[in-house]
Amino acid sequence: MKALETLICQLIDEQALSRSTLVYRVFDALLVLVGIGSAVAATQPDLPPFVAAGCLYAIAAIWGWFVLDYLARVWVAPANRDLKDRTLWQIRLEWIQSRNGVIDLGSVLPLAVGLVFAAWTPSGAPLLAVFWISRFARYTTGLDMLWRVLARERQPVLGVFLIFVLVMLLAAVLAYHTERLVQPERFGSLSMALWWAVTTLTTTGYGDSVPTTPFGRLLAGFVMICGITVFGLLAGILATGFSNELRRRDFLRNWDLVAQVPFLHDVGPGTIADLANMLRPREVPARTVLARRGQPGDCMYFIVQGEVEALVKPKPHLMGPGQFFGEIALLTGGPRTATVVTITQCRLLVLDIADFRAIAASRPELLEVIQGEADRRLGIGGLAQPKETLHE
Amino acid sequence: MKALETLICQLIDEQALSRSTLVYRVFDALLVLVGIGSAVAATQPDLPPFVAAGCLYAIAAIWGWFVLDYLARVWVAPANRDLKDRTLWQIRLEWIQSRNGVIDLGSVLPLAVGLVFAAWTPSGAPLLAVFWISRFARYTTGLDMLWRVLARERQPVLGVFLIFVLVMLLAAVLAYHTERLVQPERFGSLSMALWWAVTTLTTTGYGDSVPTTPFGRLLAGFVMICGITVFGLLAGILATGFSNELRRRDFLRNWDLVAQVPFLHDVGPGTIADLANMLRPREVPARTVLARRGQPGDCMYFIVQGEVEALVKPKPHLMGPGQFFGEIALLTGGPRTATVVTITQCRLLVLDIADFRAIAASRPELLEVIQGEADRRLGIGGLAQPKETLHE
Amino acid sequence: MKALETLICQLIDEQALSRSTLVYRVFDALLVLVGIGSAVAATQPDLPPFVAAGCLYAIAAIWGWFVLDYLARVWVAPANRDLKDRTLWQIRLEWIQSRNGVIDLGSVLPLAVGLVFAAWTPSGAPLLAVFWISRFARYTTGLDMLWRVLARERQPVLGVFLIFVLVMLLAAVLAYHTERLVQPERFGSLSMALWWAVTTLTTTGYGDSVPTTPFGRLLAGFVMICGITVFGLLAGILATGFSNELRRRDFLRNWDLVAQVPFLHDVGPGTIADLANMLRPREVPARTVLARRGQPGDCMYFIVQGEVEALVKPKPHLMGPGQFFGEIALLTGGPRTATVVTITQCRLLVLDIADFRAIAASRPELLEVIQGEADRRLGIGGLAQPKETLHE
Amino acid sequence: MKALETLICQLIDEQALSRSTLVYRVFDALLVLVGIGSAVAATQPDLPPFVAAGCLYAIAAIWGWFVLDYLARVWVAPANRDLKDRTLWQIRLEWIQSRNGVIDLGSVLPLAVGLVFAAWTPSGAPLLAVFWISRFARYTTGLDMLWRVLARERQPVLGVFLIFVLVMLLAAVLAYHTERLVQPERFGSLSMALWWAVTTLTTTGYGDSVPTTPFGRLLAGFVMICGITVFGLLAGILATGFSNELRRRDFLRNWDLVAQVPFLHDVGPGTIADLANMLRPREVPARTVLARRGQPGDCMYFIVQGEVEALVKPKPHLMGPGQFFGEIALLTGGPRTATVVTITQCRLLVLDIADFRAIAASRPELLEVIQGEADRRLGIGGLAQPKETLHE
C-alpha cells in the first residue's frame, strides 16, 4: 500500500522533473489528444459503425483513466506534506479545492453529468471531452498571469468594450436605416444589422451581408477603422498590464530563491532587491554540462538546490547550495576556465552577463565579494588563466 | 420631503458602496438592457402586433423612468455638498454640466426629440434607445483614461491615419486602373475601388470585390501587409500612451490617499513619492476578512477610511484611519499572526509584498518605522510568533 | 511688393498660430478635400457630361492654386530668416529641398507631368490629385516620428517580414500540392496558391479561394495562427520603438525650451534633465484663461514666449518670458488663488501636479526655489490664502 | 590557390562592408529571387514548353551555384581565423554547424533530396526552391532576437494559445449543436464546426461557413471578440518581451565596443554602464561626411575602428580608434565647427544629443573629460567659435 502510494507519487508529482514523471505527463497529454480526436471523429457523418463505436469506447476508456487519476491524486495528496495539526482528509480537501484539483475535477465531471442525463450519443456526451484540453493548464503558469493582468486592467478593458458596444449599436442603427430599403433580406431588422456590425467591427468580414449604398459603405469604412483602433487600444492596455505583472512575478520568485543563497546575506538589501530583479531561475537535470572549458561564458550561476562539480585539476571541485560559479569568465571577459557539470538535479539562479556588468557597476560591494571569491579560486585551482579585473 | 431626498440619495449616491445603491445600479443596468432588447425586437419583421406594441410600451416606460431618474438626480445634487456661497440651483446647474449629468441627459434627450418629430414608429424613435448604453459609462473610469491617451498621442495617431488614407487612395487609383478593364462592375469607378481598398487595408476582406489580375493581386497583398503594419503602429503608439497615463493616474490618486495616513507624515517626501507609485487602493464592504491567522500573507494595508478589528487575545484590537496592519507576515516571511475583519465599510491602501521588499531595501527609514510598530504589537499582543527581521 | 510679401507671410507662416494663418490652413485643407472628391466623382460612370466637366475644371483650378501657393512659398522663403552670408536664392533653394518644400512640389508635379503626357481624361491625370492628401503631412509631426521608429527597429521588422514571407511560401507550396487535385481552378498554380496564402496570413480572408481538403484546412488554421502571431510581433516591436522615440523627442524639445527660462539656470543640470523629461509644451492664443480663482489647480506653468496677467488686487500682475505661475495651488493643495489670462499668444511649459510632486520629492532645491517665489508672491499679493508647505 | 582563397574571402566575408562583398550579396539575393520566381512560373498552366524548360534550367543552374557557394564557404572557413590547437577540418566542421552553415545547407539539401527521389517535375522538386528564401536570414539579426523573445515569453504565449484552443473547441461544439439542424452541409460534423471556429476566432472570416441561427450569431460575435482579445494579449506579451530583449542586446554590444575606446578607461564603471545603454553603433564606408561645418550637430562619435579626418586649418587633423569628435557642437549648442570625413571604413559609436545631455547631467566626471578635450581642441584648432559651457 505504501509502495503503491510512493509509486503514484513518483508518477504525478507536480514539481518534479524526474524521468518517470515526465513520461507520465506525456502519456496524460496523449490521452487528452486522442480523446479529443475521438470526439471529433465520432461526429463525422457516414462513419462505419464499428469506427464510431471505437471512438465512443476510446472516450469512455480515457474518461475512466482520468477518474482513476483524479482519485489517486486525492489519495496521495497528503504525501510529502507537513501535516501540522490537520487530518489526512483535511489536506485532501485542500487539494480538491486547489487550482489543479478544480481543473482535474472539471475535466471528469461534465462527462459524468452527461452520462446521468443519458446524452451518451455520438453528438452528445463525448463532446464534453473537449473540456479535457483544460488539463494542459496544469503545465503552464501563463494562464494565471493572464488572469491577473485582465483583473488588474479591468477598468480600461471594460472601457474599451463599452466603446466597442457603443460603436456597434450606432453602426447597426445607421446601417438599418440606410440599407433596409435596398436589401431588406440582409438589413431588414436591427438584429440583422447588428450581425453585420459585429462582423465588420471585428474586421472578420464574412461577406454574407455587405452594404451597397454609398452612405452604407462610408459607414462600413468608418466602422472598420474603429475596429482596428479598438484592437490597438486593447493591445496597448494589455501590453502595459503584462509588463507590470511580469516584473512583479519575477521579483517575488527571485527574492525567495536569493534568500536561500547564504553567500548573499552579507550584501545590503538594496543589492538583493536589484539582484532579484535580474536573476532568472533555471531547473537542470543531473549530468548536464553548464560550462565548457575554453568556450566563451555569458552568465554566472548561483546554486539553490543540488550539487555541481567543476572539473579542475588536481581533483574535481564539488559545489553545493549557496555557492556560485562561472564568475571568472565574466570578470576576465575570457573563456571558461573549467568545465562544470551537474551531479544531481539542480535549481540554479542565472545572472546574465549584461546584468552582471550593470550590477557590478552600480553595486561595487557585490563585485568585491565575487572578485574575492574568484581570486581565491584562481589561486587554489592553479589555473593558467591570469587574474584580471573587470576594467583592464 | 427631506426623507424622500435622503432615500433618493441613498439609492443614487455615485460614490457609495451600500447595498441599496448597488441594487439600484443593477436595476438601472437591467432597464438599459431590456430597453435595448426591446428596440432590437421591435424591428423584427413578421412580429405579432401585440409583441411589437409591448416593445414600444416597454421603451416608453423605461424612458419615463430615466426622465424621472434624471430629474431626481438634478433635485438631490446639492445634498451632501458644501454650499459655500453658491445657491442650490447653481450647484444643480454644475451637476447638469458635469460628466455624469451630460451622460444622463444624453440618454433621455434623443428620444424626447424623436417624439417631437413624430418618429414614434418601430423603425423610428425607439432606435434612439441604443444611446442608453452610454449610461454604463457612469460606472467605469476607463473611458476617461482612453480619451486622455488618445488626446495625448494625437500627433502620431493622426500620422498613422494619414498613412492609412494615403495608402488607401494610392491603392484605389492603382486598382481602378488595372482591374477596371477586367471587371468593370466591381472596379468601374474610383469610389468602387476605394471600397475595395478600405475593406482590404483593414483586413476585413468581405470578398464582394476581389482583384483577379496578377498585378491587382500583388497590389492587394501589399495593401494587406500595409494594413497589419498600420495595426502594429497604432497598437504600439497606444500602448506607450496608455502606460504613461496609467502611471500618472495611480500616482495622483495614491498621493492624495497617502496624505490622509498621519503615520506617514514623518517619512521624507521621497519615500512618500515612492509609496504613491506602489500602493493600490481597495474598497471593501463591512465584515470582510482581510487576513486569516495561519495563512500566508502577501500584502499589508493602510487604513484611509473606516475601522477594522484584529482578532487577537486577550481582546480584539480596533484600528482606525491612519493605522496599518498585516506588516508582521511581510517582515517575518511567516503566516498571518491574527485574523483581521472590517467593522465598517473601509477604504484601504494595499502594499504588495513585492513592492514592500523593494521599498524596504531602498528606504530603510520606512522599514524602521514599520518594524518598530510591529515589535510593539508583537510585545503587546503576546503572540507566540518569534520576532524576526527581514533578512535573517 | 513688400506689402504683398508681408501678407503672404502672414497667411502661410508655418510656425504661427494667428487667425489669418489658421483660416488659410482650413482653406488649404478644404481645397485638398474638394479636389480629391472631384477626382473620385469624375470617374463615376453615367455621370452627366456637365458634372464631369465641372469636376475636371475644379481639379484644374485647385491645381492652379497649389502651383501659385508653391511659387509664393518659394518667393517668401527668405522673409524672417537670418541671411548670414547666403543669397536670397540660396535660401529659396534650401526651402525647396526642405521637407515641406518636397511635399508641396510632390503635390503639384504629378499633375503637371500628367498634362504633358496628354493624360487629361476623367480616368487619367485627375487621379494624380490623390497625391494632394500628402499636403496634410505639413501639419503633423507624427509622420517623422513613425519614420524614425521604423528606421530604428529596421532589423527586427525585417526579421518579421522574412518570417511572413517564409510562412507564406511554405503554405503556398503545401496548399498547391494538396488542393490542386480537388479544385484546380483555385489552386492550379503556385501563384494562385500564393494569393490564397497572403489573404489567409494577413487574416483578410476574401473567401474567393478556400481550402476544402482536411489537410488544407489544418494548414489554413495554422497559417491564420501564424498571421496573428506576426501581428503580435510587429505590434510589440513597434510599441517598444515608439516608446523610446517619444521619450527622446520630448526630452530634446523640452531641454531647448527649459534653456529659455532664466529662472532655472540656478538649479543643477540633473534637475534640468529631470524637468525636461516631465514638462509638456503648450501653445495658447491670446486672451485664454489658464487658471480661474477658486478652482482646483492641477498644473503649473513656465512662460517661454508671450505675456500673461494674474488678476490679483490691488492691480493685475504682468508676467513675461522666464517666469512661472500656478505653483501656489500645487504647493498648498488648495484652489487657485488668482485668475490668470494670456495677454498675447504664449508658448508655455506645463508641469503636471503628479510630476511636480515627484520632482519636489527628489529635488528639494527646486522645491525651495519655487517655494521662495510663492512666499514672496503671497506676501506681495496680500491674498487671504494662508501660506502652507507641501507636507503639512 | 591561395589567391583564389583570398578572392573568395573578399566576396563572402560575412562581417565586411567592402564593395565586392556588397556586390556579391546583391547577386546572391537576386539569384534567390529569380529562383523563386522561376519555381512559381514553372507551375503556371498553359505555359509554352520552352518557357517551362527554361524555368527548370534556371532553377538547376542557381541550385548548382548555391552548391558551389556552400563548398567554397566550407573551404575558406579557416581563413582569417585563429587556429589555436584545432585542425583545418575541425574549424570547417564548426562553421558547418554554425547558424549560417545550417542555413546554407538547408537551402541546398532539400533540392538534392528531391533529385534523388525523382521529383524533378514542374510541380515537384523546384518547389523546394522556396526554401532559398531562408538565405536572407544571413543578413538580419532580427530573427535571432525574435526567437529569443518567443523562448523567454514561452509560458504566457503558451497560455494564450491554450485559451485560443479552448475557446475554439467550445465554440465548435456549441456551433455544431445549434447550426447542424439548419445547415447540415456546413456544420454537419465537429470538424466542419472547428473549421468555422478557427476562421472566426482569427477574424479571417472566409465566409464559406456562416452561422444563420440567432444563437449561432451571438456565439460568433462572442468568438470574434475573444479573437481580438487574444490578439491583444499576444501583442502585449511580445511587446514586453521584445522591449527587454532589445535593451539587453544593445547593452551587451555597446559594452564590448566601449571597452575598445581607451579614452573611457578613466571614468568609473557606473558611467560606462550608463554609456553602454545609450550608445548606438554605426558602420560607415570610407569617404563619408559625418559632420559638415556650419550645420547643426545632433550627436557625437567615438571611433572604434578606422580613421577620420577633421578638415580644420591650418592642416587636417587625423583621428583614429579610441578618439572622439563632434562634442563641440553638443557642448556649445552651436553649429559644427569643422567638417569631418572618414578616411577608411569605420566602426563608430554614436551618442545622441538627448542622451549626451542626460548623461552630462548625471555624470559630471564624463562631462569634465569631454569638456577638457574640447577646450584643448578649440585652442589648437584656432577656431573663431567662442568657448562656452553647457549651461550658459
Image (cartoon, coloured by chain):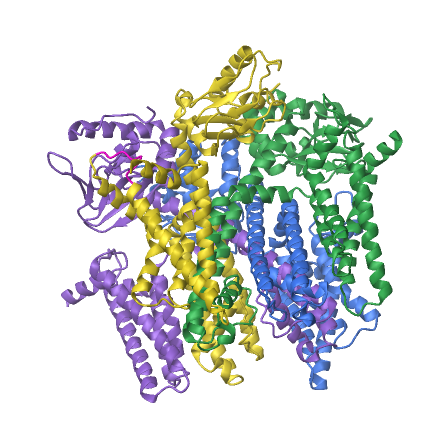
Chain colours: A yellow, B purple, C blue, D green
Q: Which quadrant: the N terminus of chain B?
A: bottom left
Q: Is residue A260 left or right of residue B368?
A: right
- Going by the picture, which residue comes out furthest to the left? B314
Task: Please identify the quadrant where the C terminus of chain B is shown.
Answer: top left
Residue found at x 33% / y 50%:
A68
- The residue closer to the viewer here, C300 or A324, is A324
Residue C268 percent location from the top left of the image: 51, 30
Looking at the picture, tell me which residue is in the foreground, B143 or C90.
B143
Q: Farthest residue to the bottom: give it.
A: B49
Can you see residue B248?
no
C202 up-or-down from A296: above or below: below
Provide residue C207's location: percent of width, then percent of height: 60, 70
In percent of the image, x 69 and y 41: which residue is there?
D102
Image coordinates of residue A122 in percent, x first then y, are 42, 67
Residue B132 placement (x, y as % from top left): 36, 71
In this rendered view, identify the residue nearer to me: C313 or D143. Answer: D143
Answer with left or right where residue A269 lies relative to residue B88.
right
A165 horizontally vs C114: left or right: left
Report whether A29 appears left or right of D243: left
Main secondary structure along the magenta-highlighted residues: loop
Picture quadrant where residue A123 is located? bottom left
Q: Residue at x 13, y 34 (%)?
A: B313
Residue C211 visible in image: yes
Range drawn in magenta = A77-84
Tell me, yes or no, whether the highlighted magenta stretch contains residue D224. Answer: no
Rendered residue at 39%/33% (across/down): B358
